[in-house]
Image (spheres, rainbow, N blue to C red):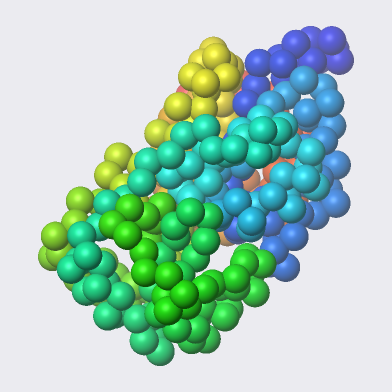
Amino acid sequence: MKESMMKNKINKVLLVSDLDGTLLNKKYAISQENEKAIKEFIDRGGLFTIATGRMEDAVIPFIDQLEITIPVVLYNGTKIYCPLKKSVLYEKKLTVKKETLQKILSIHGEEVAILLYQDSDIYTPYKNHLVTTHENQEGVECKSLSQRQPGESLTKIVVIATTHEKAKAVEEMVLQMDIACDMVFSEKNYLEILSPEVSKGIALSVLKNMLEIEEHYTIAIGDQPNDISLMKVADLGIAVGNANNELKEAADMVTVSHEEHAIATVIEQLDTLMEAKATK
């Protein structure tokens, strides 16, 4: 295909990528190959953004590295953040009664960590090894609840467990509590408690409407069950090779793993992938 034809096609493409396990490698970094491919994609007229469970402080370094100018989806769809205006354009908060919140916080221990996200900060009853690992992984700092007692309006609650089974057990406990919420796994041992009708997919639809790009061909790439909603909203849903089996089943196709520069591979094969989906 001629360069001019390819450019015209890229001008109408929105590429949306998850961060951890997708765009980021095992060292939680963006490879040179991915960075180069994304910047070239943007230079040629394509739109690129990220949809992640992370908060602002844990995402801004990657936004700056890739020079992303359009809004990004944060907190698994709870917020849409504009890097140019440095402001929140959209937010759906989680309401939790005081009694219910205390029940959830009481689960915090050596095998389970409870993190409360509120006003771009993270609070936890006390720091255990799960909290410390999370801080190091995402480059954030969790504050003690002794510093602030949160109200009933939160951004989200994250449950980190030592095993998937323990996280599932907490999910079952929350289902029995007096709380209106949606829950999703962002990693096998990470359970996220969100406001009802919140997901990356819903936020992506809101974002496309905000930017008035409903007609753009949208490609979404991810690795975990919290990316399934992206697959459903996108024109083309792609799972990385290391993805959860549930996501692979929901995706239109599977590419290489995050350790093999998956985003660069998708961009390089963009034309072929779009044609393959069209013939299905």
Residue at 48% from the left image edge and 86% from the top image edge: 128
Q: Position of residue 212 (x, y in %)?
A: 55, 14
Instruction: Name which residue lies at 78% across and 45% down.
Output: 64
- Rendered position, 256 above or below 102: above
Image quadrant where one finds the N terminus: top right
264 to 12, vertically: above or below: below
In which quadrant of the rendered view does residue 83 lie?
A: top right
Q: Is residue 14 above or below residue 170?
A: above
Image position of 105 (left or right of 205): left
> Which one is in front, 18 or 241?
18
Q: Residue at x 42, y 75 (%)?
A: 145
Residue 209, horizontal then vertical, whole percent: 49, 19
**Considering only vertical position in the picture, is 149 above or below 155?**
below
Q: What's the residue at 22%, 65% (across, down)?
A: 98
Front residue of this view, candidates 20 and 105:
105
Q: Is residue 68 left or right of residue 221?
A: right
Q: Is residue 263 visible?
A: yes
Q: Relative to 102, is 177 on the left or the right?
A: left
- Count the numbered circles shown: 0
Q: Indicate left or right for 30 with 252 as reference.
A: right
Horizontal and vertical percent position of residue 221 = 57, 42
Question: Which quarter of the figure has residue 112?
Answer: bottom left
The picture places residue 265, in percent across and down from the top left corner, at 73, 42
> Is residue 160 something one can see in this rendering?
no
Quarter of image, res 38: top right
